[in-house]
Amino acid sequence: MKTILAIESSCDDTSAAIIQDGWLLSNVTANQEVHKKYGGVVPELASRAHQANIVPVVDLAIKSAGLKISEIDGIAFTRGPGLLGSLLVGVSFAKGFALANNIPLIDVNHLHGHISALFLKEKGVEHENPSFPFITLLVSGGHSQIIVVKSFFDKEIIGETIDDAAGEAFDKSAKIMGLPYPGGPLIDKYAKKGNPKAYKFTKPKVGDLQFSFSGLKTAILYFIRDEVKKNPDFVKENLYDICASIQFTIVDILIEKLKNAIKQTGINEIAIAGGVSANSGLRNTLRNEALKNNWKLHIPEFKYTTDNAAMIAITGYHKFLESNFAEQSITAEARLKDI
Ligand code: KG4
Ligand code: ZN
């Protein structure tokens, strides 16, 4: 029996999970409320909160898996990309844990983790793994990429954003409307009650597989500024329609690029991953498009779309099986490439 403990601390969630022989036994996450009032993650506060949360979170993950520390065979951690101060807490904890318990250390790329969430297995939850090769639309607060996943360890990024990520487009639009951070889930919630065609925002003109969201953010900023000049209550009175229109535009951009990737590669096994894959507009549109175009679609469990250690644990488990271990001299990498 092989048991892996995993730590995720790349941004503002402190998370620990246990996987045994590929099955998820526990996943515990402490969210950091402290950033809400600042309209975004404050790195210094995030590292401090990780420092405070990490031991209780790990303790709870081990206990709720019904295990003892001595039963853990390896410890996986997020090496990057992410906020350096946040990553350092997880990396240092993992190193100390590995040394103290004389078990291997396994470094995981956070983005690889998001993709691996598609392979998570839980007792009692029906699940089908994607088969290789498949295309992943990886959309989070820090990244927007189209990736051809050829095998568990062989991936090729074929499209990327040239500026903001899709999650940033949601969060920055929300901030313009005076909504708290992170605004993505709120826009999703309000969009359900609004008309997606109420306001039209132009889509960026970039390469077939490229994303650009900074122009959209500016267009929304000017649009709201002009409308508020005419009616100070414009946002309040039209919140649902504005949210629905913003979400419609972002989802439309994502689907268009995905379709380009499907056309160029000829691969019609499709997956989504990352925090924005929680978006109900994106999930529903993709389900409809999949039916229409005969794609085989894989959508991660809602709770494993945003940052969590379960996705790091499943990646770490696969690396463990290949004896792909890290040295004690390994460091966190805020801009880690090479997924
Ligand atoms: O993957 P994630 O937890 O962290 C990063 O690796 O960045 O993604 C967080 C991002 C945030 O921008 C958040 O607003 C967005 O995912 N997000 C959503 C939804 N849930 C989370 N965006 C749109 N709709 C949602 N339901
Ligand atoms: Zn993430």
Image: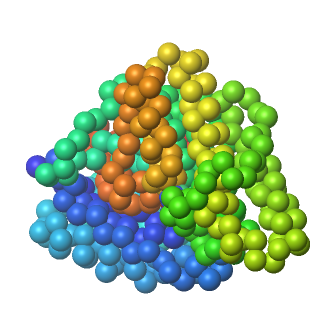
Q: Residue at x 65, y 80 (%)?
A: 38
Image quadrant in which you'd find residue 224: bottom right
Q: Position of residue 151 (x, y in %)?
A: 38, 28
Q: Is residue 131 left or right of residue 24?
A: right
From the viewer's perspective, is residue 264 above or below residue 77?
A: above
Report the colour scheme: rainbow
- The answer to which of 292 and 186 lies nearer the viewer is 292
Residue 310 at x, y percent in the picture: 32, 56
Residue 159 to residue 246: above or below: above
Q: Is residue 36 left or right of residue 219?
A: left
Q: Residue at x 69, y 53 (%)?
A: 198
In the picture shown, does residue 254 fall above or below 134? below
Q: Residue at x 42, y 54 (%)?
A: 305
The answer to whether residue 198 of the structure is visible from this angle is: yes
Depth check, front residue: 95 or 32: 32
Residue closest to the eye, 258 or 30: 258
Q: Where is residue 133? Give x, y as percent.
A: 40, 24
Kindly indicate the quadrant of the structure image that contains residue 95. bottom left
The residue under the point 31% across, 80% down is 56
Horizontal side, residue 126 vs residue 205: left or right: left
Q: From where the camera sits, is residue 107 visible?
A: no
Q: Position of residue 32 (x, y in %)?
A: 48, 77
Q: How many marks?
A: 0
- Determine which quarter of the picture holds residue 180: bottom right
